[in-house]
Image (spheres, grey):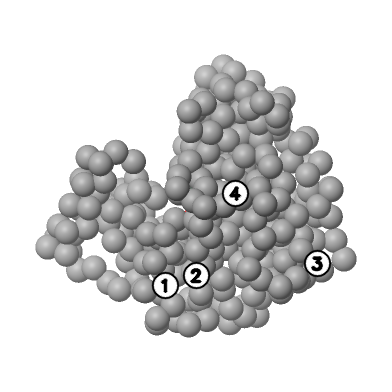
Amino acid sequence: MSQLRRAVFRTATLIEPLVRPVGPLLPPAHLRIYYYGTWSPARFDRACRDITAELMTRGLRPEHRVLDVGCGIGNVAIGLLDYLRGGYDGIDVHSGAVDWCRRSITTRHPAFRFHRANLTSGAYNPDGSAEASTYRFPFDDGVFDFVLLASVFTHMEPASLEQYLREIARLLAPGGVCVASYFLLNEQTRRGVQEGRSFMSFDVPHPSGTCLLHDAGRPESAIAFDEDYVRQVHERAGLTISHVRRGGWWTGVPHEQDVLTVVRRI
Ligand SMILES: C[S@@+](CC[C@H](N)C(=O)[O-])C[C@H]1O[C@@H](n2cnc3c(N)ncnc32)[C@H](O)[C@@H]1O
């Protein structure tokens, strides 16, 4: 992010308390603008509610232990505060987001914990000290019932996707569920992208041949994966895809991603 944009976003955080009351579980305006493009509290509320509702339709129960990979500014945690009893761990590469979540959420709700993974991400943590493609999550085998990645695999390159799916298979209890969003390329969506109907362009082939990038200079800014490749990686990791909700991203609907529900084989 440029210095100027950063300064403008920070100014919004300074001004906001003069304009409206800012509750302790509302992330600062500069982080909300960075994540959701607006400082409107209603937009953040919607981010908390929508994903929570989606997880419940995918089988989340109050006694489940949840891992939220790429937890950002805590929208899932906040959405689940009154529902979840089994415990929540969020992990992210972005220190500003994790610091806020720890300070504001964990101090009030200790069963909701946040962890920083200092991994390189061109988009979110360019100065990271390790690679996602070799990362081992700091949790024991089989301890999670539910793993979520909302808009995270849309920012990760193939070697990292493969490592994360191996790790998710290790971390999930047998029969545990992972819900993850993607831009999936198949015959239909590829046509939409080629015809310029997608909400953003994906015209840079990745050297692996498994995905298309939005920006050659910053590969992790947005990535669309070949669907057959994604299916093969799940198969190799011991994960079964049980449901695909198709999104309209390739028809021009902003950010409406494809969502895979996946079960760890017993
Ligand atoms: C588009 S944001 C989505 C945030 C949140 N899940 C949501 O839906 O609002 C992508 C998030 O993934 C995080 N991220 C990017 N690469 C990651 C990685 N390798 N491991 C964990 N988190 C990552 C970013 O820091 C950012 O918080």
* Nearer the observer, 198 or 109: 109
Hey, what amino acid is under mark 3? Gly
Please tell me whether residue 128 is drawn above or below residue 41 in the rendered image.
Answer: above
**Image quadrant where residue 4 sits:** top left
Using the image, tell me which numbered label, if any, was put on residue 102. 1
What percent of the width, then of the height, locates residue 168? 71, 59
Q: Residue at x 57, y 63 (%)?
A: 68
Q: Nearer the viewer, mark 4 or mark 1?
A: 4
Residue labelled with disc 3: 175
Residue labelled with disc 4: 131
Hey, what amino acid is under mark 2? Phe
Using the image, tell me which numbered label, if any, was put on residue 114. 2
> Which of marks 4 and 3 precedes in the sequence?
4
Looking at the rendered image, the quarter that the N terminus falls into is top left
Residue 252 seen by the camera: no
Hey, what amino acid is under mark 4? Glu
Label 1 CB-ligand 1 distance < 8 A: no
Hey, what amino acid is under mark 1? Arg
